[in-house]
Image (cartoon, coloured by chain):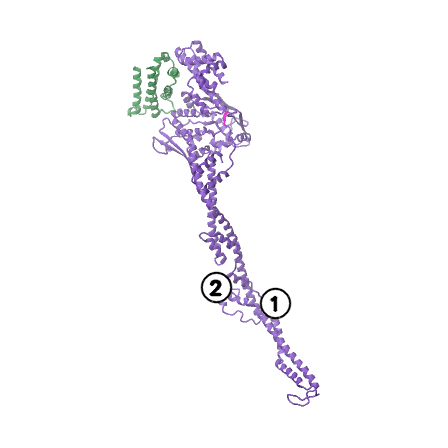
Chain colours: A purple, B green
Amino acid sequence: MDPVLRTLLLERLHASDLDDEAKRVIEVACDAGAPPVAGTAPAVWLRSVTVEGFRGIGAPATLTLEPSPGLTVVVGRNGSGKSSFAEGLELLMTGRLKRWEKRPKAWTETWQCLHHEGPTRLSAELAIEGTGAVVALSQEWAPGAAYDDASGRAGAAALLAEHGWDRDLPSFRPFLAYAELATMFDTLSSLYEALTPVLGLGDIDVLVGQLSATRLAYDNQRKEVGRAREALVARLDPDDEHAALVAAAVGAKKPDLDAIAQLLADAPDYSGDTATLRRLSGLALPTDEEIRAAFKALRVAQRVHDDAAKTDAARATNIAALLRRALAVRDPEKLTDDCPVCGTPDVLDEGWAKQAAEQAAALDEQATALTRATGELTAARRRVDALLDANARAAPGVAPSVGLAFGGDAAPGGDAGAAPATGPADPFAALSTPADVIAATAALRALSDRAGSELSRRGSAWQELSVHVAGWLEQARQVQARADTLKALKTAETWVKGAAETLRAERFAPISERAIENWRTLRQGSAVDLHDITLKKSGRTGRADFDVRADGEGANALGVMSQGELLALSVSVFLPRAALDESPFRFAVIDDPVQAMDPAKVDGLARVLHRAARTRQIIVFTHDDRLPEAIRRLRLDATMLHVDRRARSDVDVQISRSPVQRYLDGARGYAKPDRLPPEVQARVVPMFCRSAVEAAAANIVRRRAAEQGTSLDEADEQIEDARTLRETLALVLFGEAGRQGEVATEVRRRYGASAAGLVSELNRGSHGAVLDEATLKRLPESTREFIHGLMD
Amino acid sequence: MTTRLTVGAVLDEAQRHLDEFDPATSGTWPHAAAVLIRQSLESTLNGFWTVRASGMLDTSFRDRWQCLPAYLGDRPEAREADFAWTALSQACHHRAYEVGLTQDELRTHLATARAFLEVVREALA
């Protein structure tokens, strides 16, 4: 940002009652801007324009100009090629031609001179103020090239860039063509655009743009977070408790972002529904092999048991016990004993004892085998029963609660009608065969799989959503953090806009005043008065408002103005812009401003141009003699150039008489014998000669100021203030009018005795003293010589 | 004295043409007013030279205006009068493409002529 502008703005800012955050926002934005362009472009005057093979000019023609303040009027009939100089210079300096930009292609196709073979060449010499260094710009186009073909432009562009002029050209474009003059008021926004850059407030507009862009970005983010929130809530499944919790938190009027973060951080706890699904999906189910093996083992155990059960285990045990008792009661002293049960004598002998012991052992073994078979059978049956565990058996009853149905492929998950159909009946009523169990297991497995897929569906849905929620959360946190900044941005933007308006008005005031002054000179007979010009920014562009009143009526009477009046108003506004100190261009080129003006306005125009030419090199192109005539009649100081176009576009530029020349010619003419009564001649000739010296002196003082870069306004005031010839000469010789007493001596010292004599003769003669005939006769020539000496 | 009275009378007549609507002069009054104002300017100028350097009456009007500052000083009223006279002279000749002077312009020239008369009167007094 421009440092001066930055300081100006910050001073106002600190004096304002904005809150601290808004101030901080503006300060940051001020510093964030592009670094200021270092240095200013040096001021330049125009020394010459040379045009070859361009539009109306064939062979090279040069317009030579005095690189100092003053009015130069270039006169040439329509088609003389005078505008080619103006447009050539514009094209050379800016690389474009404003007048052609909205024209159809046919306009720009025949831009090269038809009478010229070889390349088009434009060149210009610019004299830098202060140093007097001359910069020569030139560009060449091959025959047939487009006018905006920039291939031959590198050199000129580099020179313009080197001095920084390219940067200032858009703002202070020193060219004003008739077409522009005429259309300046077509849109008030274009006038605003033409005037605003010269105020140097572009940086503030950029600042406003930055603030507004940031504000917009923050605001959009805020809105986006709001929209995303609704979308998110809509997507979170209300049947999933965790999602529902998150949805509630996100959808709350003022979402508690920390709580949402906590919900995201917690792993889902899978209680309720989810737990049931998990149980179902995690059922431990036997394989078909296991089922078959279990049933086979049962069958085997059954058979073994059946075999063993053929013996009466109790009886065998009892008999074995009886036999052991009998053996116990037999008297071992006797070889034989009687039976203690039936009393049969001498049957319990050694043989019996041996046999009874063997029988008892066999009977014991039989009983043990049966017991073992029974145990194994029980175990096998238990294993078969255990093929479906409690979870599996409970599954059919639980499934409907999570919207799943057991049994049959026909039952889709969540079909409410399926549950009652299978619910009451025990699906495991008959599981006596492997096939029964395999079928039940298959149904259970299907159920389990469904539960599993439902579970993973919920899981992945959540996972995806949680990413969204996390993303949203991050944005929401940023929005929350930026809420204060956003508020400050809004305040800051409004404030800077207001400050820009004020600064704009302040900076524009001098231009506006000068333009109004110009208009009052120009309006002459016009009933239209210009009261005020204001620049208003609205939206991206802005408008220039002209408070124009016709006969004191109507605050915005642009509509009642004639084309000539609008033209005059355009010139009124353009000239103050060209006169701004900020512009490095000390020259302004105006192409044909006279066209639609009535004679009285031409007089006003001559005065306005002449006033502008006190400090600027004003070059005006005109197609008729009205402006030169007015200038001569009003005795305004100006250089007239005549442009003539001969056959085959040979253009000739001839300097018509400068004021000095005109006065000298007048003096010569009136010095001729018998032209005037002698007594009149004696007064008139010295008067013309003195005017010639004064005009030359004024030129010298102005040119010197231009060369040295000192104040032209001051130089002009000095010239105006110098009342006498001696004062004027003192200004030339010593730089101050006050030393008029030393003029005679200094003139003698520098230019000789005859020159000193001439000065006194001019003074005496103009004041009525009658000069002798011989002196009078050579007066014009002596004056010419003296002026020559002064100029060197 | 007769000169001054005549000039004054001529200017009054021009003023009447500008102020009063006379159907008889419809369309021709601007031309008539221009002629009258120019005539008064010339009479004033000639009156001045008659007194100061009567030889000037043998020169052209252009010369008479050009040499005026040498005797009258560089007065703005004289410059304006010169300008008004040039403009009126052009208007008094018929030119195919030019429109006549407007009422406002004529009034300005009329005022100039009165001011010039006043300046000359003072100079000769």
Residue at image point 65% right, 88% down:
A340
| Three-letter code for the amino acid on which mark 1 is drawn | Glu
Asked if disc 2 and disc 1 are in contact, CB closer than 8 Å, the reply is no
Instruction: Please give the chain letter of the residue carrying mark 1.
Output: A
| Three-letter code for the amino acid on which mark 2 is drawn | Ala
Which residue is disc 2 drawn over? A416
Residue at image point 49% right, 14% down:
A749
Q: Residues within 10 Å of mark 2 (few under 14, many from 20)?
A: some
Residue A504 occupies quadrant: top left
Which residue is disc 1 drawn over? A289
Q: Is residue A289 left or right of residue A629?
A: right
Where residue A107 sits: x, y (%)?
48, 31
**Residue A567 in sight from this viewpoint:** no
Magenta segment main secondary structure: strand
Specify whether residue A44 is painted magenta: yes
Instruction: Farthest residue to the front: give it.
Output: A333
Q: Secondary structure at mark 1?
A: helix
Q: Secondary structure at mark 2?
A: loop
Where residue A137 sits: x, y (%)?
53, 27
* A690, A433: nearer the viewer: A690
Instruction: Please give the chain letter of the residue carrying mark 2.
Output: A
Specify whether residue A687 is painted magenta: no
Residue A525 higher or lower than A784, as above or below: below
Have a look at marks 2 and 1 and say if they share a chain.
Answer: yes
Q: Which residues are magenta?
A: A43-48
Residue A87 higher or lower than A371, as above or below: above
- The first of marks 2 and 1 along the sequence is 1
Q: CA distance from mark 2 to mark 1?
A: 34 Å
Where residue A222 sits: x, y (%)?
47, 47
